[in-house]
Image (cartoon, grey):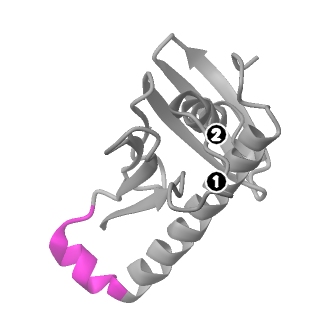
């Protein structure tokens, strides 16, 4: 299943909407990778097992299920999550890209790929529809939390 959607960050037509900057949005997306328990309430444990300036390897525990993934970062552009095939978990990826078609008109593009073929997607259409809906709701929650953190000044400086 390949699935992509956009979430608007700054509604420039609404003067009551607080504008958040690209840097604040970026810090929020990086925080989601570094501290996923803030964004995923059903995640039991998360640890970064290896880190460079542009990537990190993580171990995520959901009950008995442990997922290993790798996150790559392109500063102010995108955060890319790769899950290698492991035990009962298929290959998958998620990219969160910042789009800015005009100054301050920020969007996040969420792009999912579960590695399945088009034929497999047809066979799993009912299940995939549920997954798309769940992904979209989770992404809306992610942006809501990032906006809240930005509005309270928690994304104004370096993450520590």
Chief secondary structure of the magenta portion: helix
Q: Nearer the viewer, residue 126 or 102?
A: 102
Residue drawn at the location 47% of the way across and 41% of the way down? 104
**The image quarter in which residue 138 lies:** bottom right
Residue position for label 2: 32
Dot placed on the residue nearer the N-terminal end, 2 or 1 = 2
- Tell me the element at label 2: helix
Bounds of the magenta segment: 116-125
Q: Kindly report the distance in space between the C-alpha atoms of the residues bearing marks 2 and 1.
A: 8 Å
Q: Residue furthest bottom?
A: 126
Q: Is residue 53 left or right of residue 44?
A: left
| Residue situated furthest front in the rendering | 15
- Quarter occupied by residue 103: top left
Residue 107, placed above or below residue 71: below
Disc 1 secondary structure class: helix
Q: Is residue 155 left or right of residue 120?
A: right
Residue 3 locus on image (x, y percent):
33, 65
Q: Which mark is residue 142?
A: 1
Residue at 57 percent across and 37 percent down: it is: 25
Q: Are marks 2 and 1 in contact (CB under 8 Å)?
A: yes
| 83, above or below 157, in the image | below
Q: Is residue 124 magenta?
A: yes
């Amino acid at each position: 299943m390949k699935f992509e959607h956009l979430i608007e960050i700054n509604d420039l037509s609404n003067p009551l909407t607080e504008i958040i900057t690209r840097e604040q949005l970026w810090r929020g997306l990086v925080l989601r990778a570094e501290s996923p328990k803030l964004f995923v309430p059903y995640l039991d444990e998360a640890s970064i097992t290896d880190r460079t300036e542009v990537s990190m390897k993580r171990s995520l525990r959901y009950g008995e299920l442990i997922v290993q993934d790798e996150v790559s970062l392109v500063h102010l552009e995108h955060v890319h999550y790769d899950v290698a095939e492991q035990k009962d978990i298929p290959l998958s990826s998620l990219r969160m890209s910042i789009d800015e078609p005009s100054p301050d008109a920020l969007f996040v593009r969420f792009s999912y790929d579960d590695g399945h073929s088009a034929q497999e997607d047809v066979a799993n259409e009912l299940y995939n529809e549920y997954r798309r809906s769940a992904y979209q709701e989770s992404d809306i929650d992610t942006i809501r939390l990032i906006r809240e953190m930005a509005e309270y000044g928690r994304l104004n400086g370096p993450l520590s």
